[in-house]
Amino acid sequence: MRILLVEDEDRIASFMASGLTAEGHAVERAGTAAQALGMSFAHEYDLILLDLMLPDGDGREVLQAVRARNSDVPVVVLTALGEIDDKVALLDLGADDYLVKPIAFAELAARVRAAARHGQQSARALSSGELELDTKTRIATCGERSVDLPSREFALLEYLMRHAGQVLTRQQILDAVWGFGFESASNIVDVYVGYLRRKLDEPGRPSVIETVRGAGYRVRA
Ligand code: CA
């Protein structure tokens, strides 16, 4: 696995990195929140190990920024004893797991394996009704049709499918798929929904993406 290790304490980071490398992982290190943000946006990781107390900021901000990008890379938070008073809040922010320092390597290795399994399950394939989406190959399948989606169409469909059954407003979709601050008067969401329908809908059958009048769009659960 390709692992991003965010930890400013060199002694701890070296210990973890050498152990994980010996287990066959490719480990890249970041020592600040800014570095962690840059690296997590520039590369695809299979796992992020994230210290909370960083010299230039709080690891929670890194976690939030990663999740705001719609990334579902597994994140395991590393904390000192007593540093997290609210574990639930941490998990709500999008951490998959956490480890309390001092970290025993066997425990770390076990969490890394668990996070990897979890990541594969949640990342690989999505399905709702007849619709299937392979998130690695970006191939969407609906009945007889199978199409390779360009990145924005894929991101849109993935977002709708991860929230299957839920009505999503155009603004929610814009924020999640195009990023915050995108011109909300734009009809770009409708245009892209149109692209997906043309590729995936079967003639004479209800569309894979339902229009909920006055509200937004929904993929059936
Ligand atoms: Ca630290």
Image (tube, rainbow, N blue to C red):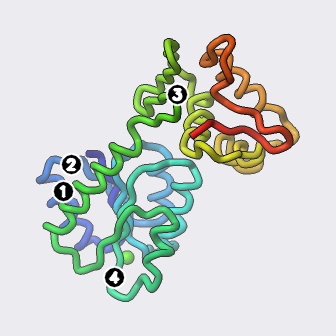
Give residue 184's position: percent from left, percent from top: 83, 44
Kindly tell me whether mark 4's CB lies below 8 Å from ligand 1: yes
Give whichever of discs 4 and 1 has the lower sequence position.
Answer: 1
Give whichever of discs 4 and 2 has the lower sequence position.
Answer: 2
For residue 52, say whether it is visible: yes
The residue carrying mark 1 is: 20
Name the secondary structure under disc 1: helix
Rendered residue at 55%/37% (across/down): 158
User: Looking at the image, is 10 positioned above or below residue 144?
Assistant: below
Q: Which mark is residue 80?
A: 4
- Image region (quadrant) for ligand 1: bottom left
Give whichever of discs 3 and 2 has the lower sequence position.
Answer: 2
Name the secondary structure under disc 2: loop
Name the secondary structure under disc 4: strand
The amino acid type found where label 1 is placed reads: Leu
The residue carrying mark 3 is: 131
Give residue 9's position: percent from left, percent from top: 31, 74
